[in-house]
């Protein structure tokens, strides 16, 4: 008997790493649908696209690690179904793999636009290494790129495409970029940075159609205007791959529902990463996160639970994004906040936006301000009451803003 | 291939051949060297791959960037030769490099 992990992404592979680190001795099997060794996705839209990262640095562990640690990898393989009663998974080629504990780490997939022309060539998404390679092979300095969606993937891709010399237009349905994930001030700041770097924005703009015969040559907006392009990149969010879990009647709610140990309703089945809806102790609610730190935290939770080890300490959600020479680090989530406090100078490109609820910080968005991020993370986790005036005064060390 | 020696806080040494172009952090992670967490995978975003570079190697390794220096303030057991190992790229020139890993990568805050 053994652990079977469905999904060979960052979360699935990390579950295997953590199990071995925790002393788990039985065989581990990872079933992943991509044809390559588990790798990290965050660089795909950044260093990888710009040709600044090697495949080896993207790869989480070399092939020898899996062989040396009795971890069997089924790559380019899909799980067809989970048989909870028989405690086995069935692969699409018919092979049955028995498990003692199962870890669902199937991640999320890029949301598709179901509009005319979506299947034209050069209409791409950016989720997997194969997606990134397709894009990388197409981008030329003279390329005209239309990016649909002003979220992190879209904006990082815009920055990388500009670095490669391409012309970029970002089409966003909302009135501002980063509308779902950042506050208005931060959206405004990043809009300015992208514009200064030559990116054009079409805001409050709905894409009606991709036009072209076989290959895309433009994006038609719902107001009739056409943005000409050679490449269109769709980055409009992700959908959790929870179909296998739903098919075997595990409770799901836009993601597989798990507890603080990453356990599903079935005590022998865990789920980790983007595919889960998980409890957040700090925010007292169920959340679904799409981030590497979240996948790593849940990989540790599942490994500890499987090994009967003490549960790891709860972590605060955090995220990062690199665009041009800017590093954005976000800690916490701005639920039900009543005020924002800005620390530092936006024009100096080093500042932080703190989201407060009463006297407590709920989230911080730090741009080239790692100290604010690191200290903010701690203040949020501990629910430390702060003094607004001190927080807003960048001459007061951020360590000294507590009440 | 350049050889890098990782010394744990207990004094255990592991000398590994790390391909040029990888970072000292990646070399450690690929070989399951204990004591380096690298939560962000090398983006200089989390300060959990902190190492103390052996004094005599510091000139060749060089100082941290401003961003890295700021992140390092929040690593634990920081010293004058502290670096984030995700920001040290392995070259032939660093053949023989010795780095020391701290007892914990959890922030000193």
Image: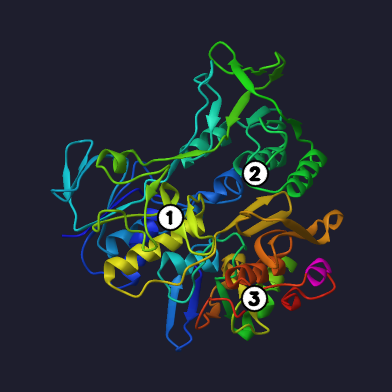
Q: On the same chain: label 2 and label 1?
A: yes
Q: Secondary structure at mark 3?
A: loop
Residue closest to the eye, A124 or B86? A124
For mark 1, name the chain. Answer: A
Q: Position of residue A341 (x, y in %)?
A: 77, 60
Q: Position of residue A211 (x, y in %)?
A: 60, 14
Q: Quadrant of residue A318?
A: bottom right
**Which residue, given by chain and number where applicable, does mark 2 sit on?**
A156
Considering only order in the chain, which callout, 1 or 2, is on the residue closer to the N terminus?
2
For mark 2, name the chain. Answer: A
- Label 3 Cα neighbours within 10 Å, binned few <14 / some 14-19 / many ≥20: many
Q: Position of residue B13 (x, y in %)?
A: 44, 83
For the record, the magenta segment spans A388-393
User: Quick one: which residue is furthest to the bottom in this view?
Assistant: B10
**Which residue, given by chain and number where applicable, does mark 3 sit on?**
B74
Q: Secondary structure at mark 1?
A: strand
**Which residue, given by chain and number where applicable, does mark 1 sit on?**
A278
In which quadrant of the rendered image does the C terminus of chain A lie? bottom right
Image coloring type: rainbow
Residue closest to the eye, B18 or A316? A316
Position of residue A181 in the picture relative to residue A97 (left or right)? right
Main secondary-structure element of the magenta-colored stretch: helix
Residue located 23% across and 69% down the image:
A25
- Label 1 Cα neighbours within 10 Å, binned few <14 / some 14-19 / many ≥20: many
For mark 3, name the chain. Answer: B
User: Quick one: which residue is furthest to the left in this view?
Assistant: A86
Mark 3–mark 2 Cα distance, whole angstroms, equals 27 Å
């Amino acid at each position: 008997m053994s652990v079977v992990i469905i999904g060979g992404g960052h979360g699935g592979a990390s579950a295997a790493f953590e199990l071995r680190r925790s002393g788990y001795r039985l065989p581990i099997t990872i079933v992943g649908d991509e044809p390559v060794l588990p790798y990290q996705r965050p660089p795909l839209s950044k260093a990888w696209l710009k040709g600044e990262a090697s495949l080896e640095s993207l790869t989480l562990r070399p092939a020898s690690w899996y062989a040396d640690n009795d971890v069997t990898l089924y790559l380019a393989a899909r799980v067809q179904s989970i048989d909870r009663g028989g405690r086995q998974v069935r692969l699409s080629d018919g092979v049955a793999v028995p498990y003692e504990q199962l870890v669902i780490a199937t991640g999320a997939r890029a949301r598709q636009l179901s509009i005319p022309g979506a299947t034209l060539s050069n209409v791409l998404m950016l989720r997997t290494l194969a997606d990134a390679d397709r894009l990388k092979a197409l981008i030329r300095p003279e390329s005209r790129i239309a990016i649909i969606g002003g979220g992190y993937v879209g904006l990082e891709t815009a920055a990388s495409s500009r670095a490669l010399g391409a012309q970029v237009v970002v089409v966003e349905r909302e009135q501002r970029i980063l509308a779902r994930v950042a506050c208005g001030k931060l959206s405004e700041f990043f809009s300015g940075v992208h514009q200064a770097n030559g990116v054009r924005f079409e805001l409050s703009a709905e894409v009606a159609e991709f036009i072209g015969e076989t290959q895309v040559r433009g994006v038609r907006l719902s107001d009739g205007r056409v943005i000409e392009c050679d490449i269109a990149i769709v980055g409009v969010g992700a959908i959790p791959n929870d179909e296998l879990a739903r098919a075997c009647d595990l409770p799901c709610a836009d993601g597989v529902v798990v507890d603080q140990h990453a356990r599903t309703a079935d005590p022998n089945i865990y789920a980790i990463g983007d595919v889960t809806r998980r409890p957040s102790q700090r925010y007292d609610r169920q959340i679904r996160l799409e981030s590497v730190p979240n996948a790593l935290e849940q990989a540790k939770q599942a490994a500890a639970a499987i090994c009967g080890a003490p549960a790891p300490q709860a972590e605060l959600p955090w995220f990062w994004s690199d665009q041009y020479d800017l590093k954005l680090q976000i800690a916490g989530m701005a639920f039900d906040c009543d005020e924002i406090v800005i620390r530092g100078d936006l024009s100096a490109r080093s500042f932080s936006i703190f989201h407060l609820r009463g006297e407590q910080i709920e989230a911080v968005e730090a741009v080239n301000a790692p100290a604010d991020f690191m200290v903010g993370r701690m203040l949020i986790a501990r629910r430390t009451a702060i003094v607004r005036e001190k927080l807003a005064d960048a001459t007061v060390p951020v360590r000294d803003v507590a009440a | 291939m350049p050889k890098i020696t990782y010394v744990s806080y207990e004094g255990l040494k592991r000398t590994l051949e790390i391909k040029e172009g990888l970072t000292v952090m990646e070399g450690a992670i690929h070989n399951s060297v204990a004591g380096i967490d690298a939560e962000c995978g090398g983006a200089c975003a989390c300060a959990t791959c902190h190492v103390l570079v052996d004094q005599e190697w510091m000139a060749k390794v060089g100082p941290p960037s401003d961003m890295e220096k700021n992140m390092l303030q929040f690593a634990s057991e920081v010293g004058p030769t502290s670096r984030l190992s995700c920001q040290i790229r392995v070259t032939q020139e660093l053949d023989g490099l010795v780095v020391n890993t701290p007892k914990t990568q959890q922030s000193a805050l």
